[in-house]
Image: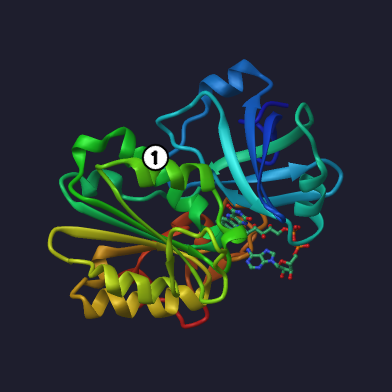
Amino acid sequence: MSHSENLYKPMLMEIQKVIPETPDVRTFELVFKDSADRDAFRFRAGQFAEYSAFGLGESTFCIASSPTRMDHIECCFRKTGRVTSELFRLNEGDTIGLRGPYGNSFPIEDCFGKNLYFVAGGIALPPLRTLIWNCLDWRDKFGEITIVYGARTVSDLVYKRELDEWQKRSDIKLVKTVDPGGQTPDWDGSVGFVPTVLKEVGPSPSNSVAFVCGPPIMIKFTFPVLTQAGFEPNQIYTTLENRMKCGLGKCGRCNVGGVYVCKDGPVFSYEQLMKLPAEY
Ligand SMILES: Cc1cc2nc3c(=O)[nH]c(=O)nc-3n(C[C@H](O)[C@H](O)[C@H](O)COP(=O)(O)OP(=O)(O)OC[C@H]3O[C@@H](n4cnc5c(N)ncnc54)[C@H](O)[C@@H]3O)c2cc1C
Ligand code: FES
């Protein structure tokens, strides 16, 4: 039975490369085992997929690579429970399943000509990293690009090699930070919580859009920094990570009020979130 006949049948993906990011976070570079699946696969920045460890179940991760770079698909995940622990155990050459892509995406075309702020915390850089690379590959379509990324400690930062690359580029501004006490003697970034460091950066709302992903506590304190700087709620976007099962709008696992996060999201503007019940 093909994927189009059975929506729950995963495509087979070979783990081409495993990149350790932190002690409990890994990146997988994945390639399609079936060339027909590869040729048919299209996605947009912000979409997610269901990744399966055979015999155990599925986990929801964003697609962390950019749609402008289709030679492989990447996910970056933290070992938290059953499925992610099994995925964490796998090696290069092993096979996992992938269903997707699902959900909506970041409104990248609406951002042409605008200044972009990317604000991320901890393991929540991957959903923005897909968009960051998409925008960098289309660099001349955007104004200034500012990235503020922080983690609790230096060892909790993901994509360290790319942070170094972004820091060297003259066409983007990267501010990396760790929480007070999380720095090492050779740390060359800022020390402070992401919202505080963002405030010091002084984000300008003029012709700008901000994309914010992070733990709930970071989001809670970052939105006010942006609104107090003059950003309207429709200039701020984030992604929600409500627990999911089907990813297809069928099981009702992910809904908040009348909204299915898997179908209507996971990308929402702050303006949309303000209309949702507080439980999101
Ligand atoms: C749209 C979306 C995108 C996501 N992208 C990523 C990603 O790129 N990288 C990544 O590491 N994780 C991501 N997540 C979270 C990820 O899906 C869960 O951490 C993972 O499924 C846990 O699976 P498990 O079987 O190992 O854990 P389980 O054994 O099911 O649970 C372990 C613990 O984690 C908690 N947990 C499980 N899922 C979630 C969740 N969605 N939110 C909060 N707590 C949860 C459980 O309550 C439990 O305490 C995303 C989630 C969504 C909905
Ligand atoms: S995950 Fe099943 S309806 Fe959203």
The residue singled out by tag 1 in the image is 133
Q: Residue furthest toward the bottom?
A: 278
* Residue 241 x, y percent position in the rendering: 55, 63
Give 114 or 154, whichever is nearer the viewer.
154
Residue 37's spot in the image, x, y percent?
A: 60, 23
Compared with 109, 212 (above or below) is below
Q: Amino acid at mark 1?
A: Trp
Q: Is residue 18 left or right of residue 162?
A: right
Of residues 39 and 84, the one nearer the viewer is 84
Q: Residue at the left extreme?
A: 206
- Image point (33%, 33%), residue name: 137
Q: Is residue 239 left or right of residue 171?
A: right
Q: How is the image coloured?
A: rainbow
| Residue shown at 87% from the left, 44% from the top | 55
Residue appearing at x 56%, y 75% in the figure: 181
**In which of the image's four quarters is ligand 1 placed?**
bottom right
Disc 1 on helix, strand or loop? helix
Picture quadrant of residue 230: bottom left
Give coordinates of residue 83: x percent, y percent.
Answer: 78, 53
Residue 252 coordinates in the image, percent (x, y): 61, 64
Q: The N terminus lies in which quarter of the figure?
A: top right
Q: Residues within 10 Å of mark 1 (few under 14, many from 20)?
A: some
Residue 16 occupies quadrant? top right
Q: Nearer the viewer, residue 79 or 244?
A: 79
